[in-house]
Amino acid sequence: MDYLATKYLRSRKIPSSACSGCGLGQCHKALVKAIDDLGYERNDIIWGTSIGCAGRQTFATWKGDSFAGTHGRVYAIARGLRLALAPEKRLVLTVGDGDAFGIGFNHLLHAVRTNAQMTVMVCDNLGYQSTGGQYGWTTPPGVVTDSSPYGMFEPNWVQPGRDVLMILKEAGATFLARHVSMDGGVLVETLRKALRNNGFSLVHVVYPCTTNFGKNALGSRKPVDIFRWIKSHAKPLGLEKEDTIWRTGIYLDASNSRPEFSQFMREKVEEIRRRHGNEGAH
Amino acid sequence: MTAETQRDKPGKTDETMKRYLETGNFAVAQAAVMAGCRAFCGYPITPATEIAEAMSKLLPRVGGYYVQAEDETAAMHLAIGASLGGMKSMTATSGPGFILYADPYGWAIGCEVPLVVLNAQRVGPVSGITGAPGQGEFYLSRYVTQGGNFETIVLAPGTAQEAFALTIEAFYLSERFRTPVTILADQLITDGWEDLSIPETEEEKRLMGLKFFERRAHPGPKFYPPTDEIDVPPVVLGMGAGALCSDWTPTEEGYDIETVEAQHKHAYRLIYKIRNHKDIIMRSETLFLDEEPDLVVVAYGTPSRVVKTAVKRAHERGQSIGMIRPISLWPFPEELFKSRATYLSVELNYDGQMVREIQRAAPCGSEVHFFGKCGELPTVSELQEVFDKLLKGEPLQRRGWETEAW
Ligand code: SF4
């Protein structure tokens, strides 16, 4: 990360305060690498984050402007901000699974509906880990957490027939993908594509939480155990096996095919202004 | 003798100004646009819907945006986002939406985001009566979010004309104090039709006493000074300042930190930037206080209009009576409650809210009474009856389901 860190990240926040062995760093690094590959400078990007591990550990790491919303609201703040920002600025959000698919889901859906430009990386640690490890909306079946002591028995949102990315697709997203954090160059390639979309992009990335998920679900805090476990349950789309939990790859690439939120708002306002001037207002 | 004093009562008009027969909702929308508001984010709710409707019509004509949100929480967060991007923004709602604002209020207060919020109070709790005036959010407008450690600025118009002036004032104060400013109206003010003058020229605006403040952007790097100073430019994202804002306790630069010292510095700023500059915010109207009356009636918003009529009549009849109408509600204008007297708080609720604040502010030896109606205004004769009793030293009693008194 050294070259990238020096160029884009604040020394005060790197290394981050994530637990040692946490896979969040892989997600973070992949995104910064994709940003660098596309030649963005620090002031081209406004970086928003959520609460939870994914939000807290990435907040204020970016050398440019950075903001963190309360639980689930960052998508609404980002959509308002999108209206006021110069069109060429890019919004990037790093958020958690609980934030995006639970408490903030309604706001996320409406950002999707309006195709508001934001590249959202959902860094998924498979539950509520910063609060000690409770189950969430992507926790795999049977997994023991502090709030599912008999194993997770509720349906989750990555199972076939109930995939959250399909909901987002129908809701109007223009770029959707899923990966695991150890996907390396493939993940970076996907993130580059997500960033090139002037619209709503979401990349769902599962990463290993050693401290809580590893301990509760696998009975091991050893990074190697959970890294291996996640990797072995991820397969590219079309190559799924019986025990595949995460089908990885690009689910939808309709980049730049539909008007972006702030763009159609600007165009409409211009049109109304031409027709009506400022009649009715003093 | 100047019996009637108006401490910076806003909204002086003159005959040459353009006049309308219009609602408070219309007045607020016109004022917001005039104050430079370019983003209104709302959610339909009676009786504030017409503000949203008016803004959806007006804003595009001046290059601004109306956004209808998925819920009230989102509406205020969208307005926050627009403000963070450098646009003056506003949202409006009523009780059931106002309670959902608790979340974004906290964020906006903590990150010191300028913003204007209007609450057209109706009758509660919960959905209650949609199309009737209430005053149930007196304390909620003070303690708008959890956690404490902040002061709020709340303005309460009594007429559509005043709603116009106070909306412009709210934008002005929100920029100077870097905080959301709440306009606490009620259903009769937003929905009621009234004679309204709207200034058009700079001269007319000056005559009306309107003040405007342009949006500026903080250059960094110390975005959150641990001082009580005002006129500090707010954080604006997208300007290349390396700005930081979050829901966590900030360092001066905006990094998240969990130390008591940093939290105390932050809280000091959020409390004292407002407390120590209260004189800029304070507005009120009083009647006959210089006569040191035995009975002082206190009311804000729409009921204050009936109270004013009743007090004037009682005064004409020779009763020792005066009136206080707080226009800025929070910080509460306790300095108006200097003399030992019998105070009567007239409110549009049955539980008695402002009366508790008067009990706190009134000097030792004062008596403080409450007369409450809800969903409808008190009548002049009802008030006269109450005044007579209090001046005779008789206790007040509630009357069936109609009035609450203590
Ligand atoms: S609790 Fe888990 S997800 Fe959170 S920082 Fe620690 S290892 Fe990472």
Image (spheres, coloured by chain):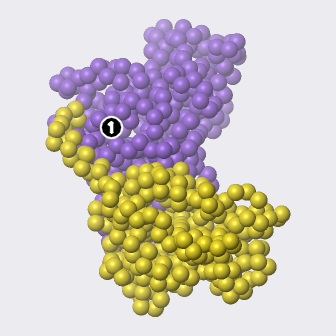
- Camera-nearest residue between B377 and B281: B377
Residue B207 drawn above or below residue B194 = below
Please name the residue that numbered disc 1 is placed on.
Answer: B56
Label 1 resides on the chain identified as B
Q: State which chain is coloured purple.
A: B
Write the residue at 43% across / 57% down. Answer: A173
Position of the C terminus of chain A by quadrant: top left
Q: Which residue lies furthest to the bottom in this view?
A: A2
Label 1: which secondary element:
helix
| Mark 1 neighbour class, 10 Å CA radius: few under 14, some 14 to 19, many 20 or more | many
- Residue at the location (68% across, 88% down)? A224
Which residue is more in the foreground, B239 or A168? Answer: A168
Q: In this view, does B201 lie above or below A19?
A: above
Residue B257 occupies which quadrant of the picture? Answer: bottom right
Vertical comparison of B252 with B343: above or below: below
> As shown in the figure, which amino acid type bears the numbered disc 1?
Ser
User: Which percent across, then down, holds residue B310?
Assistant: 49, 14
Farthest residue toward the right? Answer: A150
Q: Which residue is drawn at 80% across and 65% down?
A: A151
Residue B71 position, x and y percent, is 51, 43
Color used for chain A?
yellow
Res A181 visible? yes
**Looking at the image, which residue is at 54% across and 71% down?**
A237
Residue A280: x percent and y percent? 22, 32
